[in-house]
Image (spheres, rainbow, N blue to C red):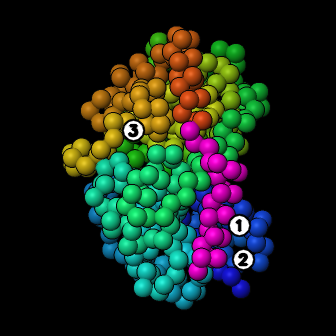
Amino acid sequence: MTRIHIVAGEASGDVLGARLVAALRARRPDLEISGIGGPRMAEQGVSSLFDYRELALMGLLEVLPKIFRLKRLLAEAGADVAARRPDVLVTIDSPGFTLRLAERVRPLGIPIVHYVAPQVWAWRPGRVAELKQKVDRILCLLPFEPVFFENAGIPVTFVGHPVLESGADGGDAERFRTAHGLTATDRPVIVMPGSRRMEASRLLPIFGAALRLAAERLPGLRPVLPVAPIVADAVRRAAADWPAAPILLDGPDAKHDAFAAVAQSGGAGLIKSGTSSLEMAVAGVPHVVGYRVNPITAAIARQLIKVPHASLVNLLAEREIVPERLQENCTPRALADALVAPMLDLSVAASQRAGFAEALAMLRAPEGLPSEAAAVAVLGMLKAG
């Protein structure tokens, strides 16, 4: 029996892992696949060693209170890999945990593939030499990443970005409006504060205040929040006093219907930085990126960050297509102004959409869907071994 072990540490990694499992089994139905993941991987028949939500932490100060628990989970995950002795270990994103796991099991001689290149090119380029000692291949999502890692002597495969097969552009606007009783005067806006507890709790009060200001200029705004289960309760509490009752969504289909409704009605998005910006781009939804972390974390990050933009759309285009309001500039007034701009001025919305097309064209792999390209690369490690 050929065994592949897949470890994902958060909701986005769970989605990637599930698609990878499906693509692997389409090519090799005989595979035995185990690992750590969430509900999407469970749907593909992968039972998780422990609740992956315990790993959904970020920020220097946010991790410290959980450090001993994380060490125990790391030891548990390492022991599981050692017991199973898979033919390939695939670690997905969440480098704070997954790369520590890779380092821990490295002496076992198991080929290790890391899916989603850690953004050392953005803020820790000196750490790439350490990465070379931990993994045998990196599966990159962004077109400018391979050269960086290849120059450091790390084998790389560019598999394309999974947002291209997310279905973000395939929603049903009328189904969404009917399901939630929206009238012709309602203007839905997408609000995405993140899938981690700490970032959501930090951003939600700021986003809520921004929505109040925006509603003064555009009556009928209706916030729509696709929420990960891990932050659902925090979102409900934070949104209790918002100017309009928010629509909370669970699951990708409902989210994509919301994207379609927002795009169709001339709405916009208020989101955190990261992959959310690419989802908005695929769906054709103009948006503003807002982000704020603990001031101490921010001060340290400023010394390390080497790239000019937080939005992946802007990084790909090498200019600001999407307005970014970060840290001390992430204020309710600044966010509200950027949110309403494309709703009040069609030329602003059109300019963003033109930039989206330019950026997204760069994310396609040479052949096949991203999950298929990733599966081919992982199976290639079996042959190499």
- Camera-side residue: 257 or 92? 92
- Camera-side residue: 79 or 198? 79
Disc 1 to disc 3, C-alpha distance = 32 Å
**Start and end of the magenta stretch?**
362-385
- Residue at the spot of label 1: 24
Question: Residue 85 is drawn in which quadrant?
Answer: bottom right
Instruction: Report helix, strand or loop for mark 1.
Output: helix
Q: Is residue 372 magenta?
A: yes
Q: Earlier in the sequence, mark 1 or mark 2?
A: 1
Q: Earlier in the sequence, mark 3 or mark 2?
A: 2
Does residue 210 sit above or below 273 in this rendering?
above
- Residue at the spot of label 2: 31
Disc 1 to disc 2, C-alpha distance = 8 Å
* Residue in view at x 56 percent, y 11 percent: 346
- Residue at the spot of label 3: 310
Q: Is residue 157 magenta?
A: no
Does residue 49 sit above or below 188 in this rendering?
below
| Quadrant housing the N terminus | bottom right
